[in-house]
Amino acid sequence: MAKASARHILVPTEEECNNLKTEIEAGADFEKIAEKHSKCPSGKQGGALGEFSPGQMVKEFDEVVFSGEIGKVLGPVKTQFGYHLIEVTDRT
């Protein structure tokens, strides 16, 4: 069965999500941005979500994690929780 590891940043607005993505793409550290801005408890761990299988996360999140490019900042991805930036760190 497929498994993936990812980290993410959750914010309430698409605008904030895009602004943070721009900062990261300009060289800002993903983990530090997650610690400072993410509304998810995982922000305290730099956004790390650990390893999970398909179906463990909400559909929109899952689709990106199991099809997106590894190591690239993906998003904004809208879910019922808000807007996510996602970085897939590993997938098997």
Image: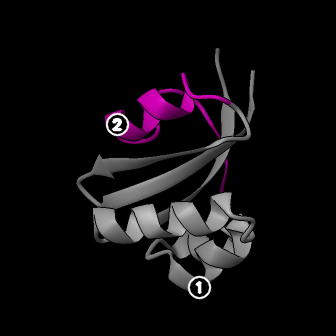
For image coordinates 47% across by 37% down, the residue present is 56
Crowding near the residue tagged with mark 1, few <14, some 14–19, many ≥20 C-alpha atoms within 10 Å: few
Q: Earlier in the sequence, mark 2 or mark 1?
A: 1
Residue 12's place in the image compared with 6, above or below, is below
Q: Position of residue 30 (x, y in %)?
A: 69, 65
Residue 70, can we see it? yes
**Left or right, 12 with reference to 10:** left
- Tell me the residue at 28%/69% (across/down): 13
Q: CA distance from mark 2 to mark 1?
A: 24 Å
Residue 8 is left or right of residue 16, and the answer is: right
Type of amino acid under label 1: Lys
Local SS, label 1: helix
Determine whether label 2 and label 1 are within 8 Å by CB. Answer: no
Type of amino acid at the residue the image marks with label 2 = Glu
Residue that carries the numbered disc 1 in the rendered image? 36
Kindly indicate the quadrant of the structure image that contains residue 57: top left
Percent coordinates x, y for residue 61 in the rendering: 42, 40
Specify how the rendered protein is coloured: one colour
- Magenta span: 47-69
Q: Residues within 10 Å of mark 2 (few under 14, many from 20)?
A: few
Q: Residue 14: horizontal and vertical position, in percent? A: 30, 62
Direction bottom: furthest residue = 36
Circle 2: element type: helix
Instruction: Please identify the quarter of the rendering in which residue 4 is found.
Output: top right
**What residue would you read off at disc 2?**
60
Residue 60 inside the magenta-drawn segment: yes
Q: Taking the image as drawn, is residue 11 in sight?
A: no
For marks 2 and 1, give the one nearer the viewer.
1
- Most distant residue in the left direction: 80
Is residue 6 located in the magenta-colored stretch of the structure? no
Is the C terminus in the top left, top right, bottom left or bottom right quadrant?
Answer: top right
